[in-house]
Image: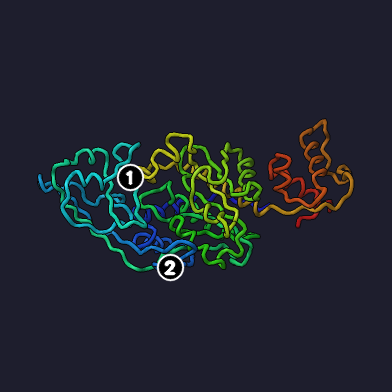
């Protein structure tokens, strides 16, 4: 049986890469995210797909690239500095340049603070807006004197370049493929995105050590527009059977599966069975029922690749959904729960194990097999549960079925069903296709 062991060395290496990347000013295009791709390429083998500014991809347009240069805001009335660029979230991503004097009341209109998290800076972005915004704490916002004048010196650069996507494959990309999605944008945000990058780096390092039946593709993209651009080239998708998007997995809340667009898709079963194997109390919600990310692009009309999302997002019925520090300067690696992240990685490893061990079972017997003749019989007096299970499995094989389908149908552990059928295969009672 194909098995994966947790590799702490790869985990620590993946954390180190993210530590180097997290504070880069990573908008969806531009210098910050390009620098992140450079860091990534120094650690894992990957191909970089590029899409020029102004290119139409499906119904979307690739934006100009963006670079932040300098920021200083001075209260002219008092002569004191108000804010400088001391944190990657100070300036909304893709803000245009502005140099001028404005009143405190107008400055307030350009500043935002995090409503639920005291003294945190909010994450803001203006990817398709010709505008600028600044992030401040609640205390800083309240200190703005509306009648005072402020000199704002914000210097950024918009320029034509390319949107980039990194792609790593565990083996020949012409093989049947399962894709793992992550987004590399969002400066200074760990659970909102970069934890998915860590996950993909770790799984890539782990899987490339193994001999697998399938190819595993790991995509590192700017959120949404990256998936749109990648999917606009249909040759990228020809062998992808299904996708898994991950983020927000280093939180203390319960793991949460957002199912694909069709509840009957096998990728949903793989996630449910993996959770059952590990005895995790994972929540499950319908497509778009938790939080929307790159999986919605791959599920969308005309692309229609079954894609799930695995997060720890609370759910919209909760006040702090998706999590308390979401889109704030408190979404840091220091505030992450790495034990919970390891739990999520073990779940993903188990999904891969199930993918690798799932076969279509074809019956080679008719009627009820005489298991005692083959040394496979469980006495109902000694092991009633296995006696019942083997009987149910035999009755399920009226037509060829995948092991995962049998396990779901019988509400049984995948590994137990696999073990039974492997023993039957050894006695030529069934064939693994």
- The disc at residue 95 is none
Mark 1: few, some, or many residues within 10 Å (few <14, many ≥20)?
many
- The disc at residue 122 is 1
| SS type, badge 2 | loop
Residue that appears at 43% across and 39% down:
323
Residue that appears at 56% across and 57% down:
179
Residue that appears at 79% across and 44% down:
396
Ranked by sequence position, the earlier of labels 2 and 1 is: 2
Instruction: Tell which residue pokes out farthest to the top in this image.
Output: 381
As rendered, which of 162 and 408 lies closer to the eye?
162
Residue under label 2: 55
Cβ atoms under marks 2 and 1 closer than 8 Å: no
| SS type, badge 1 | loop
Mark 2: few, some, or many residues within 10 Å (few <14, many ≥20)?
some
Q: Residue 37, position in %: x, y?
A: 41, 62
Would you place residue 358 above or below residue 173 in this image? above
Q: Residue 207, position in %: x, y?
A: 57, 57
């Amino acid at each position: 049986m194909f098995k994966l062991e947790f590799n702490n060395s790869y985990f620590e290496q993946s954390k180190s890469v993210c530590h180097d990347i997290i504070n880069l000013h990573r908008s969806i295009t531009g210098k910050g995210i390009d620098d992140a791709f450079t860091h990534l390429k120094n650690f894992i083998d990957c191909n970089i797909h590029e899409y020029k500014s102004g290119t139409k991809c499906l119904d979307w347009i690739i934006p100009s690239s963006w670079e932040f240069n300098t920021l200083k805001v001075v209260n002219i009335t008092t002569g004191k500095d108000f804010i400088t660029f001391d944190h990657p979230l100070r300036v909304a991503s893709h803000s245009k340049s502005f140099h001028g004097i404005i009143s405190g009341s107008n400055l307030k209109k350009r500043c935002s603070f995090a409503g639920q998290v005291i003294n945190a800076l909010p994450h803001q972005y203006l990817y398709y807006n010709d505008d600028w915004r600044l992030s401040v704490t609640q205390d800083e916002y309240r200190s703005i004197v509306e009648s005072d004048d402020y000199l704002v010196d914000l210097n950024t650069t918009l320029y034509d370049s390319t949107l980039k996507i990194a792609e790593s494959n565990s083996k020949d990309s012409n093989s049947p493929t399962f894709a793992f999605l992550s987004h590399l944008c969002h400066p200074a945000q760990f659970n909102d995105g970069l934890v998915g990058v860590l996950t993909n780096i770790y799984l890539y390092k782990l899987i490339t050590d193994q001999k697998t039946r399938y190819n595993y593709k790991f995509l590192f993209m700017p959120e949404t527009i990256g998936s749109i651009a990648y999917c606009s080239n249909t040759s990228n998708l020809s062998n992808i059977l299904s996708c898994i998007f991950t983020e927000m997995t280093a939180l203390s809340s319960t793991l949460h599966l957002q199912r694909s667009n069709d509840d009957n898709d096998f990728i949903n079963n793989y996630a449910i069975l993996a959770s059952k194997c590990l005895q995790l109390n994972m929540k499950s919600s319908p497509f778009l029922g938790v939080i929307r990310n790159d999986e919605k692009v791959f599920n969308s009309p005309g692309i229609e690749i079954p894609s799930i999302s695995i997060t720890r997002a609370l759910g919209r019925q909760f006040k702090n959904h998706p999590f308390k520090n979401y889109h704030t300067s408190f979404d840091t690696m220091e505030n992450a729960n790495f034990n919970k992240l390891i739990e999520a990685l073990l779940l993903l490893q188990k999904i891969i194990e199930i993918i690798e061990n799932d076969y279509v079972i074809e019956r080679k017997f008719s009627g009820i097999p005489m298991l005692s003749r083959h040394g496979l019989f469980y006495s109902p007096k000694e092991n009633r549960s296995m006696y019942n299970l083997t009987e149910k499995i035999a009755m399920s094989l009226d037509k060829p079925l995948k092991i995962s389908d049998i396990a779901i149908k019988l509400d049984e552990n995948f590994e137990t069903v696999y073990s039974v059928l492997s023993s039957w295969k050894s006695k030529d009672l069934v064939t693994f296709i």
